[in-house]
Amino acid sequence: MPVQDDTDTAESTLNHSSADASRRYFDAIESALDGLDVYLREDDSPLYHHQLTGKVLTEYIGRLQHSFDAWRNRVSFAKRFRINQAESGYPLFQNVLDLDTDARTAGAQLAKMPSSDELRQEMIDYILLKKKFPEPMQKSMAKRLYLDEVQKGDVFQPLTLPKSVKVSVNPKTGRPFYVVHWGAFDGTANLPLVYMAVIEDSSPNMKKLLMDGIEIKKDLDIPFPIGGLLNPELAHQFDDFCEKNSSYSLTLATIADNMDRDFDSLHPTQIRRIVMGPFYSAGVTSHGRVVENILENVSRAESAWMLSWTVQELFSISETPAKWGLFGSAPAKQAYHIETNDLEAVRQGVSAYERHALIPHEAYQAIYASGKPDEIFAGYKTHVVSGGQVLRDF
């Protein structure tokens, strides 16, 4: 079930005329995201051995859930709604752009529309007068529900701007460091991505502001999360950097090197990227005959899905000290570890990676009965949704 670099152009169109496929797809992704949310929220979840990671990811899962709630209504009135059928299994990037635009203009659009109560009355009047289904009003109601959803905000955007969620100090370097996260929906791979970074800051002003000697000031009261990088002098520049350097086609090593080069006083010591896909849904997506045939034989459509995600991590192993003098100067630079004993880690440009798959119990049983679980789940940590819980590491 690998995420491939080359984007397949195969697409699937969902609209009001393909109601069964549409309902199956949205029910499946809703179930998958709910299962992933359970996996993250369970008290004993082993998610990367770091509570902060689970908390951050939960925010982005919520954004995806809001987006799919909105898209479910959009299908009922849009001329077409396309998904990347043979690769990511997610809606095409244009749908994310539409969400972002409509989130900004929803208030103005809603002000020009009849209220929900007025639309319901129009539907009743239409049925009584015309003796047939009120399709025009149904589309208007779907559009209103769609705009109501996007107006709430918190949808998955092309770029979700960085937030600082923690500050501490590295006792070895004496620098304060920030934990920062941001999100991006890749327009080529059609995949939602979540980034987290640990970034040391050697700016004299920030050290003076945050530190008391070699420790963070005890009376420091910062209302996390903070929008943007904690360093206000670099916050806008860091936003611009994330916008230009969050593509799935860039390896973590490239992103880290670019950040290290572009900011003399910022030192990225760890970067993590969570690739939240592909998503597989029977009868809608197409990811290989073996997986398709098995999922299509699952009796309940809401259980005929599979969600995979990949965690990539890059960390610094040393630093070249800064040089300042008459004959030239250079800021401190990081040296990153690439696991050269693993060809896939080299290809991804990472120190380590993990692949995970989440699947309903009924679908897992079908795969197990097929005798091909090792073929399908090779290289993946498999987690099974069963009875509102997640059974891990099958």
Image (cartoon, rainbow, N blue to C red):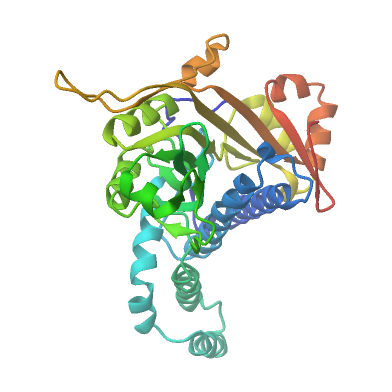
Q: Residue at x 81, y 25 (%)?
A: 370
* In front of the other: 214 or 198: 214
Q: Residue at x 53, y 89 (%)?
A: 117
Residue 32, given in percent of the width and then of the height, sits at 67, 48
Image-based side of 84 in relation to 390, left or right = left
Image-based side of 394 in relation to 174, left or right = right
Q: Is residue 329 above or below residue 42?
A: above
Q: Residue at x 45, y 48 (%)?
A: 182
> Which residue is outermost to the front?
213
> Which residue is outermost to the left?
326
Residue 320, given in percent of the width and then of the height, sits at 37, 20
Residue 223, given in percent of the width and then of the height, sits at 50, 64
Residue 13, given in percent of the width and then of the height, sits at 47, 48
Q: Is residue 249 above or below residue 161?
A: above
**Quadrant of the rendered structure where residue 30 is?**
bottom right
Q: Is residue 1 visible?
A: no
Q: Is residue 255 visible?
A: yes
Q: Quadrant of the C terminus?
A: top right
Q: Residue at x 54, y 52 (%)?
A: 60
**Quadrant of the rendered structure where residue 133 is?**
bottom right
Count of picture labels: 0
Image-based side of 237 in relation to 115, left or right = left
* In front of the other: 15 or 351: 351
Q: Quadrant of the N terminus?
A: top right
* In front of the other: 14 or 319: 319
Q: Is residue 119 above or below residue 281?
A: below
